[in-house]
């Protein structure tokens, strides 16, 4: 199968290591494209909820896919988020085509793009970290419950239903937080002369123009691989939202579960190699 070319791929909020992560679907998508540049915009590995007892082969294969791209000279930028905040101590680390950053600025066709995860705007994260982690556990349980509900609905021939989206859409404070988040990111980007500002964190895929008295900016969010299964793609000077649930070709190329010898052990060895290379750098 020929792979679709992508100039820049932005992924965020994959949450590898959690039950809600759609790793196999993500792997199907990754195998269908040929990116020139990859930005992993935070919460890729959910270190908050990571357990050695739960690290499926499909999760390891996603990591392996990223590593394969790096060995093929594809630049991969890992921007830290709140669920993988432990990596912030390694910001500035570079190894071959791989870098760990807190933010990234990309220039293309005279346009300046500012990319960061976005948890810096989350008051709950800054002042009630334990509450945020408790909320993450509850969210993961809700996703698991949602999967069970959708399994029953599909058996009955009914449409899928998102419990988490229903909760978010019905809580006025959640709607206000999302709007404040988007406007804050956009206003700061305008103040600093950016043409595009790209975030993750809030799991809401969107592309929209924001205008204030100082100027205009395009705000983008890559969504997530828990609820929406989305990414951002940049081709020929234009951004678009990729939606896996609308990509029948990728859905029909389900990968076989090839054996990866002891994926949990392989992951631990990968982390050890990373630490060794960090000391050498």
Image (cartoon, rainbow, N blue to C red):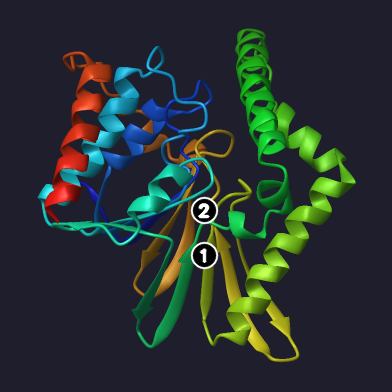
Residue 160 visible in the picture: no
Q: Residue 29: percent from the left, percent from the top?
A: 35, 39
Please state if 191 lies on the left or on the right of 124 as rendered: left
Instruction: State the image quarter where residue 109 is shown.
Output: bottom left
Residue depicted at x 64% and y 73%: 186
Please state if 29 lies on the left or on the right of 116 as rendered: left
Q: Residue 146: percent from the left, percent from the top?
A: 66, 20
Crowd band around label 2 with a 10 angstrom C-alpha radius: few (<14), some (14–19), many (20+): many
In the displayed structure, would residue 41 be above or below residue 152?
below
Crowd band around label 1 with a 10 angstrom C-alpha radius: few (<14), some (14–19), many (20+): many
Residue depicted at x 51% and y 36%: 245
Please state if 151 lies on the left or on the right of 261 as rendered: right
> Helix or strand or loop: what does disc 1 sit on?
strand
Q: Residue 190: percent from the left, percent from the top?
A: 61, 83
Residue 251 visible in the picture: yes
Residue depicted at x 32% and y 33%: 27
Q: Nearer the viewer, residue 264 or 176?
A: 264
| Residue matched to label 2 | 222
């Amino acid at each position: 199968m020929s792979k679709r070319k992508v100039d820049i791929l932005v992924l965020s909020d994959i949450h590898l290591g959690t039950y809600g992560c759609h790793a196999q679907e993500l792997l199907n998508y990754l195998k269908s494209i040929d990116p020139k540049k990859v930005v992993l915009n935070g919460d890729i590995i959910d270190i908050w909820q990571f357990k050695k007892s739960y690290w499926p082969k499909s999760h390891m294969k996603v990591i392996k896919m990223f590593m394969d791209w790096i060995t093929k000279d594809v630049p991969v930028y890992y921007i830290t988020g709140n669920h993988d905040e432990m990596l912030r101590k390694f910001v500035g680390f570079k190894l071959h085509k791989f870098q760990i950053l807190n933010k990234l600025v990309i220039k293309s066709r005279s346009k300046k793009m500012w990319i960061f995860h976005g948890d810096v705007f989350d008051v709950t994260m800054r002042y009630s970290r334990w509450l945020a982690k408790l909320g993450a556990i509850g969210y993961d349980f809700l996703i698991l419950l949602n999967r069970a509900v959708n399994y029953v609905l599909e058996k009955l021939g009914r449409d899928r239903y998102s419990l988490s989206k229903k909760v978010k859409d019905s809580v006025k404070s959640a709607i206000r937080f999302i709007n404040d988040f988007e406007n804050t990111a956009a206003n700061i980007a305008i103040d600093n002369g950016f043409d595009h500002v790209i975030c993750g964190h809030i799991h809401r895929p969107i592309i929209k123009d924001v205008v204030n008295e100082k100027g205009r900016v395009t705000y983008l969010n890559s969504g997530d691989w828990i609820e929406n299964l989305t990414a951002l793609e940049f081709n020929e000077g234009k951004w678009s939202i990729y939606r896996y649930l609308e990509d029948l070709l990728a859905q029909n190329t389900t990968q076989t579960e090839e054996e990866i010898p002891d994926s949990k052990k392989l992951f631990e060895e990968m982390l050890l190699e990373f630490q060794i290379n960090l000391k050498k750098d």
